[in-house]
Every structure is written in structure tokens, then in C-alpha cells.
Amino acid sequence: MNNIFKDVAGGFISLMIGMGITLKEFFRKPVTVHYPRESLKMTPRYRSHIIFTPDEDGASKCIACNMCVNACPSQCIYVEGEKKEGARKKSVTKYELNFTTCSLCGACVEVCPTDAIDFSKRYNLASPDKERFRRMDLCKDLEERNRKK
Ligand code: SF4
Ligand code: SF4
């Protein structure tokens, strides 16, 4: 008879412990989000493909010096620029990134003398068309971001 009481008491205690854990989890803030309606904010050190970091007027700070092109171990950057009349420095006219071969090493960001590029926080890139990532146009991307402001 004693054994039956022991079993019932043991079962009850174990049930209470289990319910306690369930209750604690029930009131805890969820770590998941309703993707794609909601997106997570990425950590400051998260690296996605590079983008232009504009100046206060929204223009690119790139002076088409090609230092990032020469520093890139994967040869995935192509830059063109021109010196406008009266300007002291060149300005970028074309900046293409082949993201399919980029290793996100950061050499381009580190070497840039004008801090014109940085890693974006875009984590949900997907497309059935690989070409979209083979020629990512950073000038166009900046234009679109300025338009959305
Ligand atoms: S992060 Fe590295 S591999 Fe990618 S573009 Fe920059 S230098 Fe090239
Ligand atoms: S992004 Fe920086 S390193 Fe690359 S071409 Fe422009 S100014 Fe030079």
C-alpha cells in the first residue's frame, strides 16, 4: 500500500515540475518571428554583400581608385570612374560585384581610403536567377535606396 502512495506522490511531483517548466516557457518572449512578414535585426558584425555608404547628400564616396579591386582575392569587383570637369577627384560611374565568388573576407572594406563601402545586413537574398548575384550594381542599389528615403 505504501508503495502505491509513494508512486502517486512521485508522479504528482514530476507532473508539477513539468507543468512549471511549461508555464515558464509559455510566458517567455518568443525568439522566432513571422517571416517573411517580419524580419530579424541582424547583429552589428553580420556580413552580407558590400554596399555603398553614402555621404550626407546621399552620393557615393567612391573615388574609383581601384584599391578594393586590387585587394580582392576573388577578383569579384569591377569599377569604372571619371574625373568631372573642375573636380579634384574621380567619381565612380560603375561598380559591379560578383557576389557568387565573394568570400566576405573584408579586404575591400578595410582597404578603402574613403570608407565608401561596408557590409550590408541583407540576409534573405534568394533568386532562381544566379545572374542577379553575378553582377550586383552598387551604383543602382544606392540610387534605389535614395529613392525609397
Ligand atoms: S569581401 Fe573579400 S572577396 Fe568579397 S568583394 Fe570584398 S575583398 Fe572581394
Ligand atoms: S570603393 Fe573605395 S577602394 Fe574601392 S574604388 Fe571606391 S574608393 Fe577605391
Image (spheres, rainbow, N blue to C red):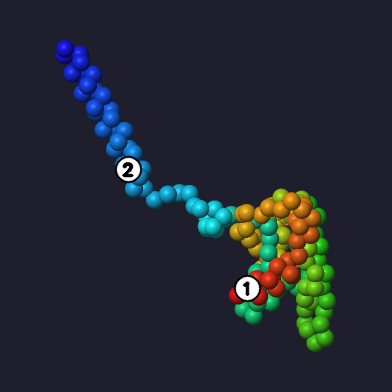
Considering the numbered disc 1 on the image, is that residue within a helix, a strand or a loop?
helix
Q: Position of residue 46 (x, y in %)?
A: 59, 54
Q: Position of residue 60 (x, y in %)?
A: 70, 74
Which residue position holds label 1? Answer: 148
Q: Position of residue 72 (x, y in %)?
A: 76, 56
Picture disc at residue 45: none
User: In the picture provided, is 43 more to the left or to the right than 142?
Assistant: left
Q: Is residue 95 above or below residue 102?
A: below
Q: Residue furthest bottom?
A: 86
Q: Residue at x 66, y 75 (%)?
A: 147
Spatial CA span between label 1 and label 2: 42 Å
Q: Position of residue 42 (x, y in %)?
A: 55, 56
Q: Is residue 145 above or below residue 43?
A: below
The three-letter code of the residue at mark 2 reads Lys
Q: Quadrant of residue 131?
A: bottom right
Do residues under tags 1 and 2 come within 8 Å of each other at their CB atoms? Answer: no
Considering the numbered disc 2 on the image, is that residue within a helix, a strand or a loop?
helix
Q: Which of the pair 12/89 is nearer the observer?
A: 12
Q: Residues within 10 Å of mark 2 (few under 14, many from 20)?
A: few
> Which mark sits nearer the N-terminus, 1 or 2?
2
Which residue position holds label 2? Answer: 24
Q: Residue at x 16, y 14 (%)?
A: 2
Q: Which of the pair 79/15 is nearer the observer?
A: 15
